[in-house]
Amino acid sequence: MSVPLPQILRPPLPPRRRLKVLRACAFLPAKALPLKVNSNPNVGRLRLVGLSGSSLSVRCRLSPARAAESESPYPIGDQEPEKAKNDSLEQWDSLTAKFSGAANLPFLLLQLPQIILNARNLMAGNKAALLAVPWLGMLTGLLGNLSLLSYFAKKKEAEAVVVQTLGVISTYIVLSQLAMAEAMPLSYFVVISSVVGSGLVLNFLNYFGFLNAGIWRLWEDFITVGGLSVLPQVMWSTFIPYVPNSILPGALCLLAAVGTVVMARLGKLSEAGMKFYGGISGWTATLLFMWMPVSQMWTNFLNPSNIKGLSALSMLLAMTGNGLMLPRALFIRDLMWFTGSAWATLFYGWGNLLCMYICNTISREFFLAATTGLVAWIGLALWKDTAAHGYNSPFRPLKELVSGTR
């Protein structure tokens, strides 16, 4: 291949000057040329061909095995550490996105058996069987999915958007079945339908950049107020009858949420307050999901016999679906997402499997296999993230996740 010398040698030269330059170039160091060539005779050699016009041509003859490496700006045999690091990051970025998208399958399978069972009972006229499904708990999950959908749509996390959309639709189908069986008030279902329809349309318009910023702010205010009102009421209701049956927690938090929204829109909050306000809806949705395993474990504690009614496959699917999203949350250093997924993986999935193992409703082999798989998956996620960023310690990604800095 022929490579022109640097620009300093390219102006027109008189004949005698050309000859002097030609003789001097035979002793030029390799770094003076755009292409670095190994002096090993088995690799290649540098040969001056001659002058033509205003430029000097240099020919580098390489062995066929090393010819491809001549395009690299690095010396032959040397690696490109920065490029290798970037390639590793891109590969891990792509893999974590695929893992997050793959979580759709276990989450779909998690809700599908309930939908099929409800449909069979409805077709058989057995509406009373649907009374066993708590519509308030399903509504809590629906609001959590809808809030997280808004959170991920704003962050443009496509795979997480699909997961939360699937959660909204599947939960809404169950609520529709409950409404048809008169297991929940029809007026509530009408309101829920309007909220779900509006939420899906607004979120997807915002994701694709077709929504007015003012309308999106109104939607964020709505889900903030809704989340702050529902969360404390659900937490309070979990411990009934050990606490009085009251709507006071939800009502008080509703007033506080409305006041916070008004202050934010009037610009009365500090910079730190506005930052906190911006994350309220996402954190309340995450806390709603985090409270679901707490509620389940509290029920197991009060009525151990209920554990026999739990499905080991459902708990395994819950653990798998949330676990698949852990690497993505760790990679983008999203503490809220990581906290919710880790909590659901460890407490809702694995925690319930532990309760079932203690009560002898699942075999030791099943529990040990699930535990080994979970530990191996978490270890793999930490190791791959550490290697992709070129770190020496697997604890550094976790430190960056908590601190929010790199």
Image: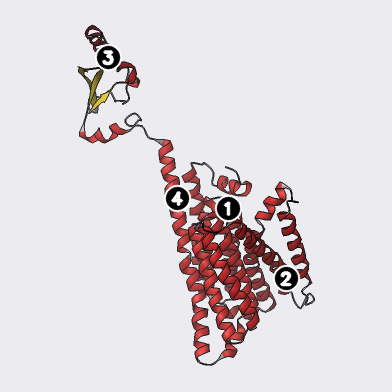
**Mark 3–mark 2 distance (CA, rounded to whole Å):** 85 Å
Q: Is residue 247 left or right of residue 45?
A: right
Q: Is residue 240 left or right of residue 404?
A: right
Give percent across and percent down for residue 323. Answer: 52, 61
Q: Is residue 391 left or right of residue 275?
A: left
**Mark 4–mark 2 distance (CA, rounded to whole Å):** 40 Å
- Callout 3 touching callout 1 (CB < 8 Å): no
Q: For residue 374, say whether it is visible.
A: no
**Who is closer to the viewer here, 188 or 287?**
188
Which amino acid type is shown beneath numbered disc 2?
Answer: Gln
- Which residue is depicted at the point 34% across and 28% down? 75
> Compared to 135, does 151 lie above or below?
above
Give percent across and percent down for residue 347. Answer: 61, 65
Q: For residue 373, say whether it is visible.
A: yes
**Mark 1–mark 2 distance (CA, rounded to whole Å):** 27 Å
Q: Which residue is mark 3?
A: 12
Observer-side mark, 3 or 2, equals 3
Q: Which residue is mark 1?
A: 334
Give the number of the disc on residue 233.
2
10 Å crowding of disc 3: few (<14), some (14-19), many (20+): few
Which amino acid type is shown beneath numbered disc 1?
Answer: Asp
Q: Which residue is mark 4?
A: 92
Observer-side mark, 3 or 1, equals 3
**Who is closer to the viewer here, 324 or 137?**
137
- Which residue is depicted at the point 36% across and 32% down? 78
N-term-proximal mark, 1 vs 4? 4
